[in-house]
Amino acid sequence: MRKFGWPWKRTSAPAASAPEQGLTCQELVELVTAYFDGALTPFDRARFDTHLSLCDGCTRYLAQFRQTIQLTGALREDDVPEEAKERLLGAFRGWTSGGDATK
Amino acid sequence: MSPSPSAQGDPHAGEAELIARIRQRDEGAFAELVDRYHLQMVRVAQSFVRDHETAEEVAQETWLGFLKGLDRFEGRSSLKTWLFGILANIARTRGVRENRSVPFSAIQGDDPEGPTVAADRFFPAGHPSAGAWSSIPDDWEAIPEHRLLANETRATIDSAIAGLSDLQRAVIELRDIAGWSSEEVCNVLSISETNQRVLLHRARAKVRLALETYLRASG
């Protein structure tokens, strides 16, 4: 079991996002969608993966984000309101009878 | 859990057959297509025009355009591409009339909203752990499935989505509910890949925050 700890401990003075120092948690959270979409550069992806392998907080954040997407995806689309549907079917009937309901 | 869910199944299933039936004046087939796409159309239109009523009109007009053009449709592009192409044209014309010729992309492109996670969740600049979590995010894996799938959880997500900007809402609904690809979303909304990603990320982050707030309060 890993222990919780501050994931990204800096031993040297921070130049906030100098690449050789990796990402901070605060930077990582802004890149999650790009990471999921495979849109990070190989360099940033490596920094992301490295950080993640060391950081319990970001691992949890990523899991939360995944669950958010999953739960959103489980929402059913609403039904088309009856009124709108009736109007469209009316237009369809106009079209089938060769009238100019489509004009 | 997979990050790319599509709860609605394959949206293209049987489209050629549906079109053939509509050409034979089968009302049921038309109704099926309306069920499949109408709300998505209203949503997309809503990102171009000012109010819901106008968006609804744009969608209606698109269906009329669809019926008119049906005999000329040769199926070289997918039905969805064709349908939403008509929609985007009509919506854009309306948008011009309403002084909104493009979606809000131009305005939101430079991302004036600030960070998606509040700065006070991290150690501040100057702290030895600057930029690291000051308190670790909750473990949602430990939450029982039935709580995550409860109606209240759904309602929380629904109302978070309802509170988004029109364009953020269009993007998250098309990507995460309707299961569109990012390319399809960019094309129909006329936004860049980068812009699309920023909008989607913001939208997801807001839904996540709403869920976090809800799960903490009810836990």
Image (cartoon, helix red, strand yellow):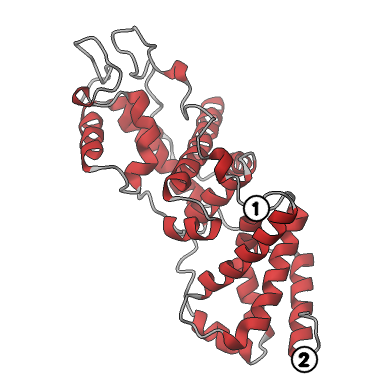
Q: Are marks 2 and 1 in contact (CB under 8 Å)?
A: no
Residue B138 higher or lower than B145, as above or below = above
Please tell me which residue is depicted at 57% across the width and 68% down the height of the picture: B85
Q: CA distance from mark 2 to mark 1?
A: 34 Å
Q: Nearer the viewer, residue B106 or A48?
A: B106
**Does the rendering let one see residue B28?**
no
Give the residue type that dot 1 points to. Answer: Ser
Give the residue type that dot 2 points to. Answer: Gly
Please tell me which residue is depicted at 50% across the width and 30% down the height of the picture: B212
Mark 2 surroundings within 10 Å by alpha-carbon count, few (fewer than 14), some (14 through 19), many (20 or more) = few
- On the image, the x and y values in percent for residue B133 come to 36, 19
The chain carrying label 2 is A
Residue behind mark 2: A98
- On the image, the x and y values in percent for residue B159 come to 63, 40
The chain carrying label 1 is B
Residue behind mark 1: B101
Q: In the image, are marks 2 and 1 on the same chain?
A: no
Q: Nearer the viewer, residue B138 or A33?
A: A33
Please tell me which residue is depicted at 43% across the width and 58% down the height of the picture: B183
Residue B156 higher or lower than B40, as above or below = above
